Image (tube, rainbow, N blue to C red):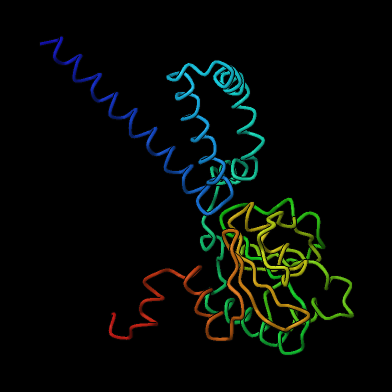
């Protein structure tokens, strides 16, 4: 009887072990999904297949090269996947975006952003409005000019007006308030993006590649409105589509469903 109990105990440990490993792999997959790391992993997988094939076919030179490559593989992975690893580690201490909103209503904030974006786009004034989500943007907040002001279309239009000393940088919204303005964001290094996109769009893509921030971008040249998130960008948005996208991203799903379907109680 004790032997059976011991075997069952080890079986439960094995199950727990598998669940933990599976969860870690799943989180890593979510972190690299849609990024350049996917192509890198495919390349490493091909090299692994080539390594086993070289052993089976007795290709000594190739096997020797690949065998020595695996000795520095860990360091290579850290260097190649640095942005993804940084983002994954940052999410360990993540917090919920709207849990920090306190008295600021989500709908009111989104409406102020939409109205400001439409005004700025109509005047062809460039702007970068960054929503801090679950990943802390403290490093970028500290580099800008602290405001800690209520979000309003008037203030946003004033900040991004060409006569303002802060108009070239980004505004970061944290805890439902404008935390800082005049922030400079990292530019994306992706060579596949359209050449039509300027520095603002590249900065929006850069910050969303490293964090889970959401960025509203207004083009100075065309007056078009774009939305960047997850390293991708949605271009040429109007009032309705910008509002709908922001609601789908930030507002609770049941609340959005009630708006789109009045029969839901």
Where does residue 41 sit, x and y in percent of width and height?
52, 40
Q: Is residue 36 above or below residue 133?
A: above
Where does residue 158 sit, x and y in percent of width and height?
80, 81
Describe residue 145's horizontal placement relative to residue 24 as left or right.
right
Q: In which quarter of the image is the C terminus?
A: bottom left
**Identity of the residue drawn at 51% across and 75% down:** 245
Q: Quadrant of residue 85?
A: top right
**Identity of the residue drawn at 52% across and 47% down:** 31
Q: In which quarter of the image is residue 239?
A: bottom right
Of residues 230 and 79, the one nearer the viewer is 79
Spot the residue most to the bottom: 122
Q: In this view, does 73 lie above or below 202?
A: above
Of residues 14 and 225, the one nearer the viewer is 225
> How many marks overall?
0
**Identity of the residue drawn at 42% across and 19% down:** 56
**Identity of the residue drawn at 60% across and 33% down:** 77
Where does residue 18 sit, x and y in percent of width and height?
33, 30
Describe residue 263's horizontal placement relative to residue 178 as left or right.
left
Of residues 221 and 55, the one nearer the viewer is 55
Where does residue 93 sit, x and y in percent of width and height?
56, 44
Q: In which quarter of the image is residue 5?
A: top left
Q: In which quarter of the image is the N terminus?
A: top left
């Amino acid at each position: 009887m004790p032997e059976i109990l011991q075997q069952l105990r080890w079986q439960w440990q094995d199950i727990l072990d598998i669940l933990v490993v599976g969860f870690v792999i799943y989180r890593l997959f979510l972190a690299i999904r849609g990024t350049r790391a996917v192509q890198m992993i495919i390349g490493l997988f091909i090299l692994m297949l080539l390594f086993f094939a070289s052993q089976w076919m007795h290709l000594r030179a190739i096997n020797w090269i690949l065998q020595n490559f695996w000795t520095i593989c860990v360091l290579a992975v850290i260097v190649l996947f640095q942005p993804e690893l940084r983002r994954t580690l940052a999410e360990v201490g993540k917090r919920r975006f709207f849990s920090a909103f306190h008295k600021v209503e989500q709908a009111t904030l989104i409406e102020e952003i939409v109205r400001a974006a439409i005004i700025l786009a109509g005047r062809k004034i460039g702007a970068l409005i960054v929503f801090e989500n679950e990943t802390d943007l403290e490093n970028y907040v500290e580099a800008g000019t602290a405001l800690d002001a209520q979000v309003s279309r008037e203030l946003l239009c004033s900040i991004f007006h060409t006569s303002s000393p802060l108009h070239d940088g980004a505004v970061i919204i944290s805890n439902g308030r404008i935390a800082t303005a005049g922030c400079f964001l990292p530019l994306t290094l992706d060579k596949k993006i359209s050449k039509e996109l300027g520095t603002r769009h590249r900065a929006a893509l850069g910050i969303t590649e490293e964090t889970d921030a959401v960025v509203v971008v207004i083009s100075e040249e065309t007056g078009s409105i774009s939305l960047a998130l997850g390293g991708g960008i949605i271009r040429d948005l109007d009032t309705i589509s910008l509002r709908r996208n922001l609601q789908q991203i930030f507002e609770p799903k049941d609340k959005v469903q009630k708006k789109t379907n009045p029969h839901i109680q």
